[in-house]
Image (cartoon, rainbow, N blue to C red):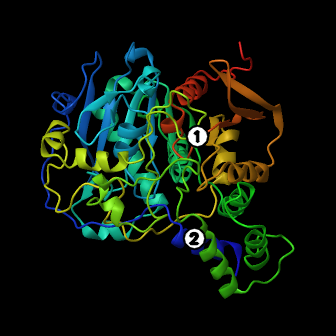
Amino acid sequence: MKKNALWLLLVLMLPAIACSRKPEKKVTVSSGRKEEDLVTGLPGQPPVNFRHYAGYVDLGPRQKQKSLFYWFFEAQHNSSGRPLVLWLNGGPGCSSVAYGAAQELGPFLVRTNGGNLTFNDFSWNKEANMLFLEAPVGVGFSYTNNSVDLGKLGDQVTAEDSLDFLINWFTKFPEFRSSDFYLTGESYAGHYVPQLAEVIYDRNKKVQGDSRINLKGFMIGNAAINEETDMAGLIDYAWSHAIVSDELHSNLHSTCGLDEEQTSNTTIQCYENIKAFMEAYNDIDIYSIYTPVCLSSVSSSSSSQRRPKLVVSPSLFTYHDMWDKFPASGYDPCTEAYTENYFNRKDVQVALHANVTNLPYPYTPCSGVIRRWGEAPSTVLPIIQKLLTGGLRIWIYSGDTDGRVPVTSTRYSIKKMGSKVQLPWRSWFHESQVAGWVETYAGGLTFATVRGAGHQVPVFAPAQSLTLFSHFLSSTPLPSKRF
């Protein structure tokens, strides 16, 4: 069995989320004026001095039947002078609103099942205007009036639809056309972000003036970017962290073609070893190997409980007063269920101008209607190299306790690119403690780890992630001294 075939098998058994929903009746959602999308009276929201907007952007004129949902937060201070940043979660099929905005790096976090929102002291809108997009159609509140669209989804469609969204969003918010623009995301956004950056980059060569999007770079975390090295890193990480035995690790290498000298494989043997590998994660969370799993009954009726283990997105969200200790103070591994309950509230949907078509299914953090994912290249490394050559700033970061897209996978992928080291491996600091390690490469590429963080770095290391984000935007080195 070839390596790419093995990776497909592993993805099917250890997938990032995919699911499917029925189409809904067409409804006119707004006239396109941003004032109609201003959010007021959001249930449980603490008082703030910045504005936020939420609603739909139709993808016309090319695809009028599609509408994508967004949530936009102006920067807390000097919004007109701050960059604009788009955040994308992965899956494919998971919501940037339910995860990125409400559980990771937005200003309002869902922390309890009671529905009150907690102000995030480490929200990324301290540094930038933050835009969260639910893409493609079928994710979150985003929808299509043509059910055929749900069968055509894939990487390229997602990139093109996201570009159409941005073009039309700038029509709603023309004051941000000239702002420096960055893309950020995690997990399968390791595909989404470079692919969207590429279509923006290519389009910018064909248009002029205000039609251009002022793209400066992108940052991706615990990102799936190259199947071969992602797979090898996944298996080696589990072995190096004492999750699988020496024997299983060796068997995976010998039967699944992980060694370059391996020329043939026994498919059944490889499959059985992958099955054993999956079983090793049965009782822990692959997305954060040292933190507890959710045992609360609060999520017993949620869709997250009904999904097979290892087929759900990470569900560990908490404050981290002592971020490098596990479990951390205030840690609550059940927040995904809280968020799902919150966005299913009718009063919340009304406040966010969401679900205006009365979707015939409940809101879920990861799509229940996307059942097929089409075009998806095995690697985006050539795109990353192309955009580095084109002058974009690219940072890749990795929480080092994630077992799903682990730091080993990212290091193997960067090594495969053959980039020349410019500034060698060193520690970086936050509040006098080592926050991780960083290496800089010629051409604009930076790789940083975040110590003690799982798959969703802003959840486990919120202060450190904000520092990382700030230095990325300013293109300045991460702190190199303890004091």
Q: Mark 2 points at which residue?
A: 279
Q: Where the N terminus falls, by quadrant?
A: bottom right
The amino acid type found where label 2 is placed reads: Glu
Q: Please state which of the two labelled residues, at mark 1 or mark 2, is closer to the viewer.
A: 2
For this rendering, which residue is in front, 303 or 178?
A: 303
Q: Where the C terminus falls, by quadrant?
A: top right
In the displayed structure, 455 sits above or below 120; it is below
Mark 2 falls on what kind of element?
Answer: helix
Is residue 173 visible from the viewing direction of this image? Answer: no
Crowd class of label 2 (few under 14; some 14 to 19; many from 20; radius 10 Å): few
From the viewer's perspective, is 224 left or right of 315? right
For this rendering, which residue is in front, 262 or 67?
A: 262
Q: Residue furthest right?
A: 261
Are circles 1 and 2 on residues that touch, CB within 8 Å? no
Residue appearing at x 64%, y 42% in the figure: 387
| Residue 127 spot, x, y in % from top left | 47, 21
